[in-house]
Structure formats: structure tokens, C-alpha cells
Image: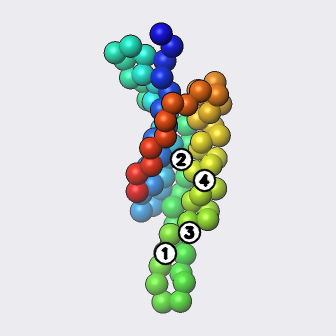
């Protein structure tokens, strides 16, 4: 049986990261494949997440995870 590769993307108030999990039989290995900053942007009188930049960061992490998983990801999860 080959390992199952799963990607978790976690976006917090100040930073985000992409973690690749490899499940092989009864063993789980975690590897941080990408980390990025999350800073707000001001629109009129309030602060918001820069969703377009965050989307680009998520895609960057996804690309690195696919490379590390040898083009085989079984699933992706996103948490904010």
C-alpha cells in the first residue's frame, strides 16, 4: 500500500501555512511545505483580509505540496 498524501491549509490572523500529511499504514508524518504572512488591507474605514493575495499564497502552497507528494494528493482541507 502506498502512502496517502493530504494537504491542510491553515490561515490565521497573522500568517498561514500549508502542511502536507503522509499517512502510511498507521504512521502520520507532517511536513510544513509553505508559510506566508497574512496582513489586512484597509478598505474605506475597515480592515479586511486581502483575499486575492491569500488565494495566490494558497495556490503557491498547493503547488509545493503537489511536488513534494510526487503529483498525488488525495485531499485538501482549509481552515481559517
Query: Of helix, strand and loop, which one carries label 3?
Result: loop
Q: Quadrant of the C terminus?
A: bottom left
| Residue 43, horizontal then vertical, whole percent | 54, 84
Closer to the chain start, of discs 4 and 3, is 3
Disc 3 vs disc 2: Cβ atoms closer than 8 Å?
A: no
Position of 76 relative to 6 (above/below): below
Q: Is residue 60 above or below residue 21?
A: below
Q: Are marks 1 and 2 in contact (CB under 8 Å)?
A: no
Residue drawn at point x = 37 percent, y = 17 percent: 27
In this rendering, would 36 be left or right of 30? Answer: right
Few, some or many residues within 10 Å of mark 3 (<14, 14–19, 20+): few
> What residue did someone put label 1 on?
48
Q: Nearer the viewer, mark 4 or mark 2?
A: 4
Query: Is the residue 44 above or below the residue 16 in the image?
Result: below
Check disc 2 and report the residue beneath it.
35
Residue at the image position 55 percent from the left and 37 percent from the top = 33
Q: Which residue is mark 4?
A: 57
- Please give left or right for residue 26 compared with residue 32 in the image: left
Task: Tell me the residue that label 3 is attached to.
Answer: 50
At 53% from the left and 81% from the top, the residue drawn is 42
Tag 2 or tag 1, which sits nearer the N-term? 2
Q: Considering the numbered disc 1 on the image, is that residue within a helix, a strand or a loop?
A: strand
Q: Nearer the viewer, mark 1 or mark 2?
A: 1
Rendering quarter of residue 41? bottom right
Count how many numbered circles sit on residues in the image: 4
Horizontal arrangement in the rendering, residue 67 relative to residue 10 (left or right): right
The answer to whether residue 31 is seen in the rendering is no
Amino acid at each position: 500500500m502506498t502512502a496517502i498524501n493530504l494537504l491542510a491549509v491553515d490561515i490565521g490572523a497573522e500568517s498561514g501555512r500549508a502542511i502536507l500529511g503522509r499517512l502510511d499504514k498507521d504512521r502520520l508524518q507532517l511536513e510544513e511545505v509553505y508559510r506566508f504572512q497574512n496582513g489586512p488591507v484597509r478598505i474605506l474605514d475597515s480592515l479586511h483580509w486581502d483575499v486575492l493575495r491569500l488565494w495566490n499564497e494558497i495556490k503557491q502552497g498547493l503547488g509545493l505540496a503537489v511536488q513534494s507528494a510526487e503529483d498525488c494528493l488525495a485531499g485538501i482541507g482549509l481552515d481559517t
